[in-house]
Image (cartoon, grey):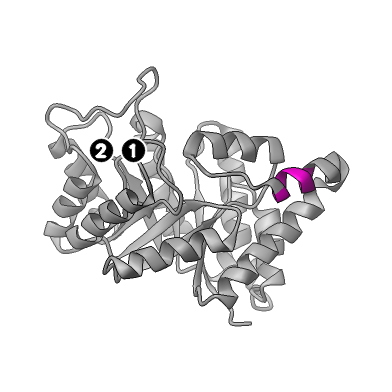
Amino acid sequence: MTTPALSFEFFPPKTLDQSFRLWETARALAPLGPDFVSVTYGAGGTTRQLTHEAVTALASHYGLNVAAHLTCVDATREETMQIVADYAAAGVHEIVALRGDAPQGQDRFAPHPQGFANSVELIEAIAARGDMTIRCGAYPEPHPESPDTAADVAWLKRKTDAGATSAITQFFFDAETFFRFRDQCERAGITARIIPGILPIQSWAGTRRFAERCGTSVPAWAEDAFAAAGKAGEAQLALETCVQLCSDLVAGGVDSLHFYTLNKPDLVQKVCAALGVVPPRGAMSDVA
């Protein structure tokens, strides 16, 4: 089996305990040699400064290629582009450009009167600088606000035409879900790399809730398997299902995997080891 390239998503810490967890996660996963790591941006822009601090710290202390999430939420165009300029000044030259979710207390996204209306406008503005690698989001199953996958594919085409050179998908449970989406994207003329987003199941109950919020369908086999495994068998089943999903993707020609780590490295490390990705001897002690 071909060894895939890896990337990892982290979220910025809001407390001292969360800070320790992020740095331990980065220390554990950095030796796996990821192509990049990304740092999320809280709903409604709530972690804007925390995201900046985490991005710059990961880049400077761990030598990681960091892609900073950036959204259109609750900011003017000028404010948003200043964030991009600040990242560039700090040596960070990758952005994951997203529309973003509605701020807390609002049902739907509404653009700032002086802000970017959507992710396409944001991508166009960042691309015009000429000094950023831009990634975007993709939805192998319909986005909660989208009528169908065809509309999501058409929107992804607009984002890649605007300047995004790769897309990271929402998580899914079956490899065939990704392959169908990839085929639709190819037929639509999308040439940008589409990287499958992988969510190792740290908690089945939590994963189900997240799936409901983001429009990911939960297959009957997963419901049945985790019900049968119970709490005692959940961790082993989570490892086995994630390894199988990744193996199926790689067998189907996928060469890059993006893991949503939730700042918890253990399960991600085990999955990567099963895929043949392990740190070189002595690498752990080299990461400060």
In the picture, which quadrant includes the C terminus?
Answer: bottom right
Residue bounds of the magenta highlight: 221-226
In the picture, which quadrant includes the N terminus?
Answer: bottom right
Which is the main secondary structure of the residues drawn in magenta?
helix
Q: How crowded is mark 1: few (under 14 residues within 10 Å), some or many (20 or more)?
A: many
Q: Which residue is drawn at 56% across and 46% down?
A: 22
Q: Which of marks 1 and 2 is nearer the N terminus?
A: 2
Q: Residue beneath label 2, please? A: 72
Asked if disc 1 and disc 2 are in contact, CB closer than 8 Å, the reply is yes
Q: Distance between the residues labelled 1 and 2?
A: 6 Å
In the displayed structure, 280 sits above or below 79; it is below
Is residue 17 left or right of 124 when viewed as pictured?
A: right
- The answer, for residue 43, to whether it is visible in the render is yes
Furthest residue in direction top, as rendered: 105
Q: Which residue is drawn at 81% across and 54% down?
A: 236
- The answer, for residue 46, to whether it is visible in the render is no
Residue 273 lies in quadrant: bottom right
Q: From the top left corner, tell me how far across and down residue 32 is, in percent.
A: 59, 69
Furthest residue in direction right, as rendered: 232
Q: From the top left corner, tell me how far across and down residue 36 is, in percent.
A: 44, 63
Q: Which residue is drawn at 36% across and 59% down?
A: 167
> How many numbered discs?
2
Q: Does the magenta stretch include residue 102?
A: no
Q: From the top left corner, tell me how far across and down residue 140 is, in percent.
A: 44, 54
In the displayed structure, 77 sits above or below 7; it is above
Q: What element carries label 1?
A: loop
Q: Residue beneath label 1, please? A: 100
